[in-house]
Amino acid sequence: MASGGFPDFNNTEIAFRARTSLELRKASWLFRSFNYQWLVEGGEIALKLAFSLRLPVQSLVRFAFFDHFCGGTTIADALTRVHALGEYRVRSILDYSVEGQQSEAAFDAALNETLKIIATAANNQELLPFTAIKMTAIGRFDLLAKASTGTVLTRAETAELALVASRLHQLCAASAAAGLHLLVDAEETWIQAAVDRLVLEQMAAFNREVVVVYNTLQMYRTDRLAYLYELHAIGKARGFKIGAKLVRGAYMEQERARAATLGVVSPIQPNKAATDHAFDVAIAYCIEHLADVAVFAGTHNEDSVRHLTKRMVAAQLAPDDRRIECSQLLGMSDNLTYNLADKGYRVSKYVPYGPVASVLPYLARRAAENSSVAGQAQRELQLIERELKRRG
């Protein structure tokens, strides 16, 4: 097994060794399509209409892009991809990517599906060390928004919030019992305060000896570095460890639009450079405090991953230190994932799964991300074409 050092993220032979040339040519076509904004936007509308009319488009969607970004429609489907990734020392995070539900029955269904993921992962701990959950999968968005304002809840709302806390507690308890970790995804700023409070209490309960529960900090927010420091101080005072999943953020347009509508200062960093700086400062802080903090770096940014590996080498940390994980989404940034794994670093892929129609919102975000000015499409294309040329 390789023993650390600095991965070469331009090494396409390692990056794409799990893919056939046919698969690479298909991926090239997919990422080229993201260059056409009208196709991305029009395609999403057309697909929603097609599914609402129950037109037979599922096979087309699977062939075109679902199978590139998703592991399958069920846990059993996704496990095939999990084992394929594991052959190259890449771990997986199964993510039930069904969104937009609002009923208590739907929240209980999401809880039960996530408990099934944890049970599956318990038998495959090296391949599936983490499970992920969005709080809006197990609780109502508007309830979390109201709870975040500090407004007094009604008796019914208080009971409803207690149910949300109970669902989260069940997931944390199951993860701890199985020797696994739970990542709680970030949400919009106007519901995040309630999420932070709920996750903090689970950290206090389960992160005594090792880190089980991770909260997600979106570093495009101007206040998240200060929150990381505050969270660390609270943990030291109360005797528990901190799990910090660091990402750049996913709701920039909504956040800025809402701030403009309300006439308040935007909670988002003024530019990309400020976000990058905050992310890298947070990485450095976590590595400096590994006695109390475990860090999960969810990023496609090559500079940030280099920063992480340099910090680890400078601190003389083993590449497979269990307190440090790096992760990318399935179907993106294979040059980071596979080259990190080749050098022995702990790295994983988010592997979404779920019914094709229900996963459309997730797929729409991947398309939007790749078609944006700062998206991944051009970099992905460059690497794919380089590897195809190398193969001749």
Image: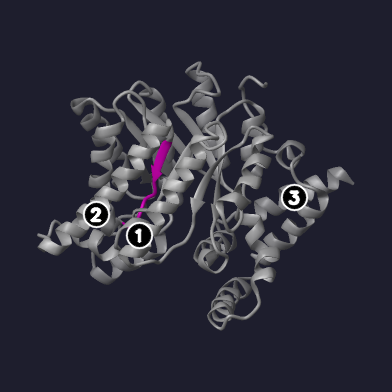
Which residue was labeled with disc 1?
Answer: 107
Q: Residue at x 32, y 44 (%)?
A: 170
Q: Which mark is residue 304?
A: none
Above or below, 388 relative to 12:
below
Earlier in the chain: of badge 3 and badge 2, it is: 2
What residue would you read off at disc 3? 384
Residue 124 percent location from the top left of the image: 55, 35
Q: Are marks 2 and 1 in contact (CB under 8 Å)?
A: yes
Picture coordinates of residue 126, whole percent (x, y): 55, 31
Q: Residues within 10 Å of mark 1 (few under 14, many from 20)?
A: many
Q: Quadrant of residue 277?
A: top left
Q: How many marks?
A: 3
Q: Amino acid at mark 2?
A: Leu
- Which color scheme is applied? one colour
Region in magenta:
181-188
**Mark 2 = which residue?**
163
Q: CA distance from mark 3 to mark 1?
A: 40 Å
Earlier residue among tags 3 and 1: 1
- Of mark 2 and mark 1, the one earlier in the sequence is 1
Q: Which quadrant of the figure contains the N terminus?
A: top right
